[in-house]
Amino acid sequence: MGQPMVIEATYPRVVIVDDDDLFRESLGLNLAEEGYEVIDFPSGDSALSYLLNEEAADAILLDWRMPGLDGLAVLRRLREARLQTPVIFLTMLSDEIYEEAALKWGAVDFIDKSRRLPIILQRLKIITEGAKPSATQVGEGEDSAAGFKRGPLELRDDINRAFWNDQQIDLTLTEFAIVRFLATQAGGDVSYRQIYDIVHGKDFVAGYGTDGFRANVRSFIKRIRKKFRDVDDGFDRIENYPGFGYRWRDEEGETTSGVYGAG
């Protein structure tokens, strides 16, 4: 009889780039306990030396302010080298101008460093468990990628990007997930709690009383609407259902929905 086949377990590889040694070590240990293979670097230069030498990673957690190359410069170098590894910024810079710059250069999310570990883990899970295009699919065009279409809306699940009338909408991972959930439930009502669960994870206990999550959800919807209206000032597809939540509204006569997959 032949020898039994041994299948090696593979773990998602996450690269952490941050000049704060204590933060980098703490986050790395926490991610390792959650089943991630972690490689960390104290500077943008050292991280680029690793990543640009064709060393694979499933996700990069990137600080903004660092001596030498800052986070945005690192991201720009990666994208100019056509390296499309998903990048999440972890930073104390909360001004929208920083988020907009990061997303414009292809970051998939922008998270305040003070956020709890479960939030970071949730974003990583979306990336590492989501659809990944194979090497042969890169550059083959829209038909080879997994995605969803509804009227003028197109959602690319392989790169977590949204398009409205073929114009890219710079959504964070959380905003992308909210839009996808609303659009796939088009015409139906989605509760505040359902949307909040997308943001924080199912059954997360919200502050400020039993309905404390509503203000948080309204803030997300306001930001999402603004981003769509930046490319289409007439955008009005996300409707409020007072006291309950929101719904995605289709225009009469337009193509209702469609899902396409790789291959």
Image (spheres, rainbow, N blue to C red):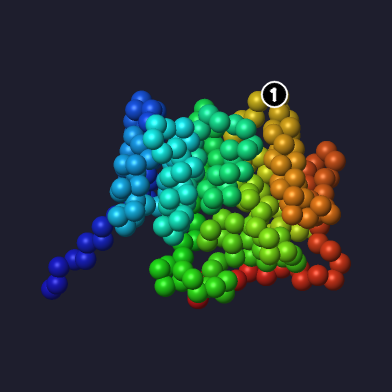
Instruction: Give x and y (percent) for residue 4.
Output: 19, 66
What element does badge 1 sit on? Answer: loop
Tell me which corner region of the image, top left, top right, bottom left or bottom right, holds residue 56: bottom left
Instruction: Give x and y (percent) for residue 131.
Output: 49, 61
Residue at the location (53% across, 52% down)? 106
Q: Is residue 54 left or right of residue 58?
A: left
Instruction: Name the residue nearer the viewer: 15 or 168.
Output: 168
The residue lying furthest to the front in this view is: 68
Q: Is residue 89 left or right of residue 257?
A: left
Residue 202 appears in view: no
Instruction: Give x and y (percent) for residue 212.
Output: 71, 29
Residue at the location (76% across, 59% down)? 186
Q: Determine whether 192 is above or below 258 in the image.
A: above
For label 1, count other residues whose C-alpha is less than 10 Å away and answer few (under 14), some (14-19) or many (20+). few
Instruction: Name the residue nearer the viewer: 147 or 202.
Output: 147
Instruction: Give x and y (percent) for residue 77.
Output: 43, 50
Kind of residue sitting beneath label 1? Tyr
Tell me which corner region of the image, top left, top right, bottom left or bottom right, holds residue 99: top right
Reading the image, the residue beneath label 1 is 208
Q: Is residue 72 left or right of residue 188?
A: left
Q: Determine whether 89 is above or below 166 in the image.
A: above
